[in-house]
Image (cartoon, grey):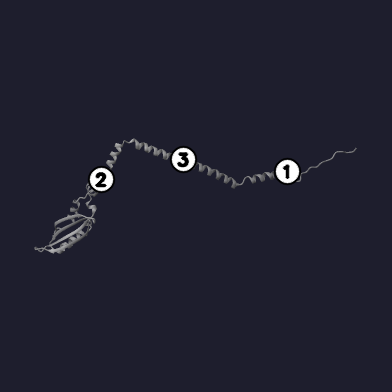
Amino acid sequence: MENNSFQTSFIPKKPINATISGSSVGFEKKHSNPFVTFSVIIFILTILISGGLFFYKSYLINQKDNLASTLGQIKNSFEQGTISELELFDKRMSASKQALSNHIVLSPMFSLLGEVTIPVVQFTEFNHESTDEGFIVKISGISPDYRSIALQADMFNSSKGRMFKNVIFSNLNKDKNNKVTFDVEFLVDPSLLSYENSILTEAQ
């Protein structure tokens, strides 16, 4: 009997699993690039930050406008008369401070002058004037001898007499009683004459 059956052999040249697996692996490698992922994340963060800054800027501008409006309402709420009174009071306070700072008192200077004057020296005439250089004192005096005048000059130049600046002795002459007459001139440190400083010292 004639046999009509036949055998067909279909054997793929390459393994199917290998081909599929290779394609899958290639796909994953192609779409799993870390640089691309990182770039996407940075892009998203940049958009979020930019949006946040824009809204925060808008918020600050609104706050500024609200504060300006509130201050304007508060200012308008004061009566004009009250504002005028406050301005006048401020001017008076400023004038009082200015007058106090310019006012001088001579008692501390006389007290210090008495401390630096040696017992044998006498002052016979006292004059003072305010100039562009400062407060100048001119004194005439009498001394038993020239040595006493030298001692007096040393007292002016000592630490106790430091408030008296540029001390100059002049016109040294013998009188009919054989005593030495002289003139002395010096500048007074402004802090010694300050009325404000005097009040603070007395308060301590």
Please tell me how crowded label 1 is: few (under 14), some (14-19), or many (20+) other residues with Cα within 10 Å.
Answer: few
Between disc 2 and disc 3, whose residue precedes? Answer: 3
Please tell me how crowded label 2 is: few (under 14), some (14-19), or many (20+) other residues with Cα within 10 Å.
Answer: few
Circle 1: residue type: Ile
> Is residue 117 something one can see in this rendering?
no
Secondary structure beneath disc 3?
Answer: helix
> Is residue 27 something one can see in this rendering?
yes
Residue 85 picture location, percent across and down? 28, 39
Residue 189 picture location, percent across and down? 23, 55
**What residue did someone put label 3 on?**
58
**What residue did someone put label 1 on?**
16
Question: What residue is rendered at 18% in x and 61% in y?
Answer: 169
Residue 105 picture location, percent across and down? 20, 50
122 sits to left or right of 29: left
Vertical side of 201 occupied by 155: above or below: below
Question: Given contact means CB atoms under 8 Å apart, are the residues at marks 1 and 3 in contact?
Answer: no
